Image (tube, grey):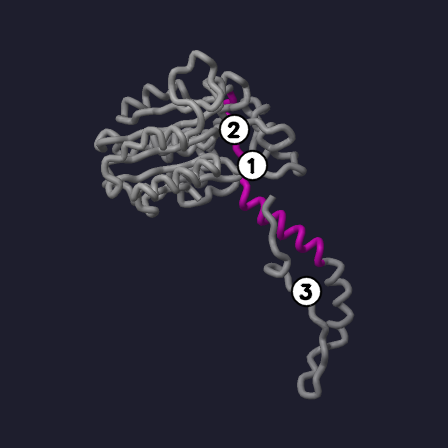
Amino acid sequence: MATISTAATISTPTTLRPSSRHAFAHPKMLRSLPSLRRRLPSLVTVAAVQQDAAVWNAAPVASVGAASADGTLFHLRVDLSDAADLAASYTSPGQYLTIRVPGDDGLKPAFMAIASPPGAGGGFEFLVKTVPGATAEKLCGLRDGDVVELGAVMGKGFPIERVTAEETLLLFATGTGISPIRSLIEFGFAADQRADVRLYYGARNLQTMAYQDRFAEWESTGLKIVPVLSQPDDSWEGARGYVQKAFLDAKNIANPASTGAVLCGQKQMLEEVTLALAADGVSQDKILKNF
């Protein structure tokens, strides 16, 4: 829940000390101070409720469904037909917001990257990993028509304008970090006009990998997908281990000066891939993150 500083809205009365030159403390004013002090908490509460009401946008759930075979990931789509301003404020892939379930005041709102591309219409889509005892678990258990509350869209998203001319663009994602990467892919970044566009996408196994049903569509835009599984079964013939290792094994950057990258996911992956790219001569300014 959004909070406010009482100092920013209501100043606690200071002790009034008449001076020899400016005696401004009238007796009636002094008698009113105890009453004002008693009212202060209620005034602050009203102000907080008013601010909270301005920040949160109630919206109905349009659909909830499984996003992975193992039942840990869910697609959540929220209808923004009555929240046009909120929908319009989403302008760049990689932006995110907070989301909560009304009535669960004891749970912290969840930060969620928006998975659908800007301007898609029909509302926002999210990829949610269920976490026991957290808001995410509540979200995964919702039904069509249930109501959620969304905070304002935050962040500037991926500064994709920094890599518009690069011949090579490398995308890296792990877990639910694929959400804003999906938004970028479907928003479009002229993949078919670049010489080399790759997505290194890491998951534990195929049962925990979301969006496999979209892979063919993504590859039709000129993107090469490299799934990387850390715990695959014996039949898996693709890349094994972690995303950063798969990239280091392949590398194959033709021209570092004309290479950009977009990263989202697990912290260690972000750090190690960033170091590897920089060591190869890729400009730090062209290694994009959404925070």
| Label whose residue precedes the other's in the sequence (1 or 3) | 3
| Label whose residue precedes the other's in the sequence (1 or 2) | 1
The amino acid at mark 1 is Ala
Which is nearer the eye, 18 or 139? Answer: 139
Can you give x and y, in whole percent of width and height, for residue 61 in the image?
52, 27
Q: Is residue 291 magenta?
A: no
Q: Is residue 64 magenta?
A: yes
The answer to whether the residues at label 1 and label 2 have Cβ atoms under 8 Å apart is yes
Which residue bears the numbered disc 1?
A: 110
Label 1 – label 2 distance at C-alpha: 10 Å
Q: Magenta residues, as a range?
A: 40-65
Picture quadrant of residue 39: bottom right
Label 1 – label 3 distance at C-alpha: 34 Å
Picture quadrant of residue 140: top right
Label 3 – label 2 distance at C-alpha: 43 Å
- SS class, disc 3: loop
Which residue bears the numbered disc 3?
A: 12
Instruction: Say how many tags the image has.
Output: 3
The amino acid at mark 2 is Val
> Does residue 126 appear in the picture of this structure?
no
Which residue bears the numbered disc 2?
A: 128
Image-based side of 141 in relation to 227, left or right: right
Picture quadrant of residue 24: bottom right
Which is nearer the eye, 231 or 165? Answer: 231
> Does residue 258 appear in the picture of this structure?
yes
| Label whose residue precedes the other's in the sequence (3 or 2) | 3
Can you give x and y, in whole percent of width and height, for residue 199 in the image?
35, 29
